């Protein structure tokens, strides 16, 4: 039996600038916090950097040819802020902007709709050195940068995403220090999150004045289940749900932060101004991008910082090579929860995918059967949500290419396309061929 997707459903793949482009300082670009972080000894597995990555900055035409071969109807990528504004504000670097304009034009020539993310974590160091996301001026900086891109490309870009996963910018970036800029400070994290929400709002307000298409926010979501039905584990799952799933969405849709956050952060939780919360709520969003990978199974552990809980993995679980449990039912649950809690607004799955220990290419084939299974089961889960009334409009596999997986370097491979680290040769994996067939038939058997 074939399960058909709605007419016009977008079939995409996603990437981000620092993870694939390489040449981060080419043509007058300014450095980002990720360039600085990867060049700080001890931060990244094997001391790897995004200096070459997938060399997409030079091989973008070849990569679009691969998208055409797959039959993609959409492609999500991010703009490196420092390529366009090397100092973060002010002077526009035309060569950097031109790179993205060429990319957009070529995608459109092949009927591939661009979805452009403005911020996928690579803040220019020039702004970081002025306080970065801790600076109350940062929302205005972001809106200025956004307007440069709206002016240049809104006539050709049907969907914009302001921020990718503000939770990851906040928690690994400012609370546990695993990601750039590597801070560990409970007093900083809530302020960063608040400025990110205001940055989204300022960009949306600017967009309403000048843009003609659609603008949204991409968040990482995972349903939180108690590891057993003890009251302690149940309460821990509720806290983790507030911390991961509701921290950004409640202010956006309900105009308030989840009450649990004040308890979690205690004296590090500021008092917020009503006008800020109203600004965030009123700006809203045209759609939500959902990045879904797994669920959280939560066990109460008094004293475990900051939640008094940890995430555990069931002993019999199948996991990806990131150690994330493979749990497709959680995708249906997440999409239904979003619709139920915040209303039936348009949703896109802006990321979904798996890092797997793929066998090496053999005779031009990569037999990544675990990824094939992940793709198929998650698309079936998405389809189930659509059948139950969820307004899901598109799917973007993470990722098009094997790429630079942040603190884990190149060892974790998420691509539909294998990238040889020495030759940069691209090889379609079995998952890419499977996805091509799903796209061709607009359905899954
Ligand atoms: O590679 C990342 C991406 O940059 C953001 N979402 C999760 C992916 C896998 O970890």
Image (cartoon, rainbow, N blue to C red):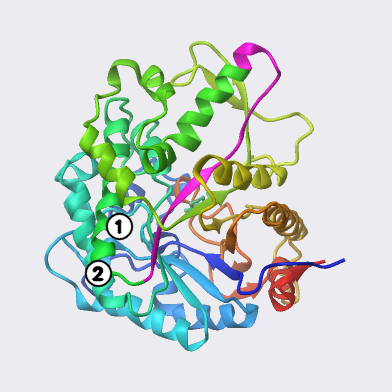
Residue 145 falls in image quadrant: bottom left
Task: Give the camera-side residue of 10 and 359.
Answer: 10
Task: Give the camera-side residue of 399 and 407.
Answer: 399
Is label 1's Cβ within 8 Å of ligand 1? no
Q: Which mark is residue 210?
A: 2
Q: Which residue is mark 1?
A: 204
Question: Could you tell me how many numbered marks the image carries?
Answer: 2
Q: Quadrant of the C terminus?
A: bottom right
Residue at x 43% of width, y 45% of height: 44
Specify the segment rendered in magenta.
Answer: 213-233
Residue 220: within the magenta?
A: yes
Q: Relative to 113, does residue 49 appear above or below in the rendering? A: above
Q: Relative to 251, does residue 29 appear above or below in the rendering? A: below
Task: Give the camera-side residue of 204 and 241.
Answer: 204
Q: Quadrant of the N terminus?
A: bottom right
Dot 2 lies on which element?
helix
Residue 148: within the magenta?
A: no
Residue at x 51% of width, y 71% of height: 75
Q: Relative to 333, does residue 126 appear above or below in the rendering? A: below
**Where residue 30 sits in the image (x, y, percent)?**
22, 62
Task: Give the camera-side residue of 63 and 246.
Answer: 246
Q: Is 36 left, or right, of 225 in this rendering?
A: left
Q: Residues within 10 Å of mark 2 (few under 14, many from 20)?
A: few
Residue at x 39% of width, y 17% of height: 263
Dot 1 lies on which element?
helix
Residue at x 40% of width, y 55% of height: 49
Q: Is 195 left, or right, of 222 in this rendering?
A: left
Q: What is the CA distance from the residue labelled 1 to the residue labelled 2?
A: 10 Å
Residue 226 falls in image quadrant: top right
**Residue at the limit of the structure toward the left, as seen here:** 90
**Where residue 334 sits in the image (x, y, percent)?**
61, 43
């Amino acid at each position: 039996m074939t399960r058909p997707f709605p007419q016009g459903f977008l079939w995409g793949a996603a990437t981000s600038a620092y993870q694939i482009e390489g040449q981060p300082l080419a043509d007058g670009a300014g450095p980002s916090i990720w360039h600085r972080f990867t060049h700080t000894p001890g931060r990244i597995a094997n001391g790897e950097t995004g200096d070459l990555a997938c060399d997409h900055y030079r091989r973008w035409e070849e990569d679009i040819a691969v998208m055409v071969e797959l039959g993609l109807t959409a492609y999500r990528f991010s703009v490196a802020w420092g390529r366009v504004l090397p100092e973060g504000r002010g002077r526009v670097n035309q060569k950097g902007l031109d790179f993205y304009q060429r990319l957009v034009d070529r995608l459109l020539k092949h009927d591939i709709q661009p979805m452009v993310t403005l911020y996928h974590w690579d803040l220019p160091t020039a702004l970081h050195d002025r306080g970065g996301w801790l600076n109350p001026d940062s929302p205005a900086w972001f809106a200025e940068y956004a307007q440069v891109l709206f002016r240049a490309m809104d006539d050709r870009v049907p969907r914009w995403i302001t921020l990718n996963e503000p939770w990851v910018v906040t928690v690994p970036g400012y609370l546990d220090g695993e990601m750039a800029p590597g801070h560990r400070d409970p007093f900083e994290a809530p302020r960063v999150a608040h400025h990110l929400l205001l940055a989204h709002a300022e960009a949306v307000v600017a967009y309403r004045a000048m843009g003609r298409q659609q603008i949204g926010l991409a968040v990482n979501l995972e349903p939180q289940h108690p590891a057993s039905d003890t009251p302690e584990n149940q309460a821990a799952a509720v806290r983790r749900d507030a911390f991961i799933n509701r921290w950004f969405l409640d202010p956006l849709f309900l105009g308030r932060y989840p009450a649990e956050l004040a308890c979690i952060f205690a004296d590090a939780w500021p008092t917020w101004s009503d006008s800020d919360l109203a600004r965030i709520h009123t700006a809203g969003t045209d759609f939500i991008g959902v990045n879904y990978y797994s669920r959280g199974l939560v066990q109460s552990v008094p004293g475990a910082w900051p939640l008094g809980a940890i995430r555990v993995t069931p002993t019999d679980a199948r996991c990806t090579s990131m150690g994330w449990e493979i749990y497709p039912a959680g995708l249906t649950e997440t999409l239904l929860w979003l619709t139920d809690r915040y209303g039936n607004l348009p949703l896109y799955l802006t990321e979904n995918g798996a890092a797997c220990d793929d066998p090496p290419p053999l005779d031009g084939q990569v037999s990544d059967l675990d990824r094939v299974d992940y793709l198929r089961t998650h698309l079936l889960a998405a389809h189930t949500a659509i059948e139950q009334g969820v307004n899901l409009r598109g799917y973007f596999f993470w990722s098009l290419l094997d790429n630079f997986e942040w603190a884990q370097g190149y060892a974790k491979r998420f691509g539909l396309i294998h990238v040889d680290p020495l030759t940069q040769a691209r090889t379609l994996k079995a998952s890419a061929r499977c996805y091509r067939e799903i796209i061709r038939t607009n359905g899954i058997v």
